[in-house]
Image (cartoon, rainbow, N blue to C red):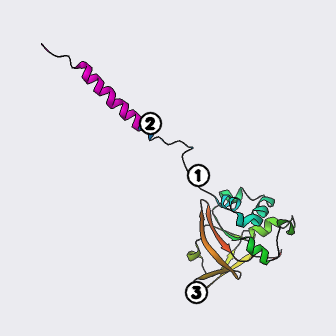
């Protein structure tokens, strides 16, 4: 008499199908699982050492612009603002705040090693002069103290003083 092996085969098939389905489902990525890249605006907004720059960015209404464009930002930290006796963003007049912020931005992502010596136009058309002494990069005589802080839409170079250009 022949044995009925249908039940054993069905159980094996069901076990394999269940294991395969569980593997496929468990490996599926959700949009909640993905790490969102930080933009230049996000880095400035989330970092306490840029609180004055953050206030200037918000007052200039340039938060969205610093999330989309591919740029290089020369970012003075709070210590740099302190050296310039600027302890609040309210020191900068409302009609000059956007011009002030644009003075610290050049188009295109440029790493510190790729910065060419000489003149670079800022977003406000002011002239930024890049110099190098040994391994120290300077912009309008402001030393880059922390180069190449990468963001999704560009790069940030932290500088030790404020770049002031009068309109």
Cα–Cα span, label 2 and label 1: 22 Å
Q: Secondary structure at mark 1?
A: loop
Left or right: residue 42 compared with residue 163: left
Q: Main secondary structure of the magenta part?
A: helix
Q: Circles 3 and 2: CB distance less than 8 Å? A: no
Q: Position of residue 18 (x, y in %)?
A: 37, 30
**Is 14 in the magenta?**
yes
Q: Which mark is residue 134?
A: 3
Q: Residue furthest left?
A: 1
Which disc number belongs to residue 36?
Answer: 1
Of mark 3 and mark 2, the one earlier in the sequence is: 2
Q: Which mark is residue 160?
A: none
Residue 84 x, y percent position in the rendering: 80, 77
- For marks 2 and 1 on the same chain, the one whose residue lies earlier in the sequence: 2
Residue range corresponding to the magenta coloring: 1-23
**Is residue 21 on the magenta stretch?**
yes
Q: Residues within 10 Å of mark 1 (few under 14, many from 20)?
A: few
In the picture of the structure, the residue carrying the numbered disc 2 is 25
Q: Quadrant of residue 167?
A: bottom right
* Residue name at image x 30 percent, y 24 percent: 11
Relative to 88, does residue 61 appear above or below in the rendering?
Answer: above
Residue 138 position in % (x across, y down)? 66, 81
Secondary structure state at the residue bearing disc 2: helix
Question: At x 78% / y 78%, what residue is drawn?
Answer: 83
- On the question of residue 39 being in view, the answer is yes
């Amino acid at each position: 008499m022949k044995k009925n092996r249908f039940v054993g085969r069905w159980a094996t098939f069901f076990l394999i199908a269940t294991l395969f389905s569980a593997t496929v489902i468990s490996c599926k990525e959700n949009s909640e699982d993905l790490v969102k890249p930080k933009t230049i605006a996000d880095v400035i907004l989330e970092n306490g050492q840029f609180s004055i720059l953050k206030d200037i960015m918000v007052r200039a209404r340039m938060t969205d612009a610093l999330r989309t464009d591919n740029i290089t930002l020369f970012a003075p930290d709070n210590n740099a603002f302190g050296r310039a006796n600027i302890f609040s963003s309210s020191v900068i007049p409302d009609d000059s705040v956007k011009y002030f912020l644009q003075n610290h931005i050049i188009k295109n992502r440029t790493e510190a090693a790729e910065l060419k010596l000489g003149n670079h136009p800022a977003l406000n058309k002011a002239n930024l002069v890049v110099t190098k002494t040994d391994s120290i990069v300077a912009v309008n005589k402001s030393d880059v103290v922390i180069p190449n802080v990468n963001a999704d839409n560009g790069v940030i170079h932290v500088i030790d003083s404020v770049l002031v250009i009068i309109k």
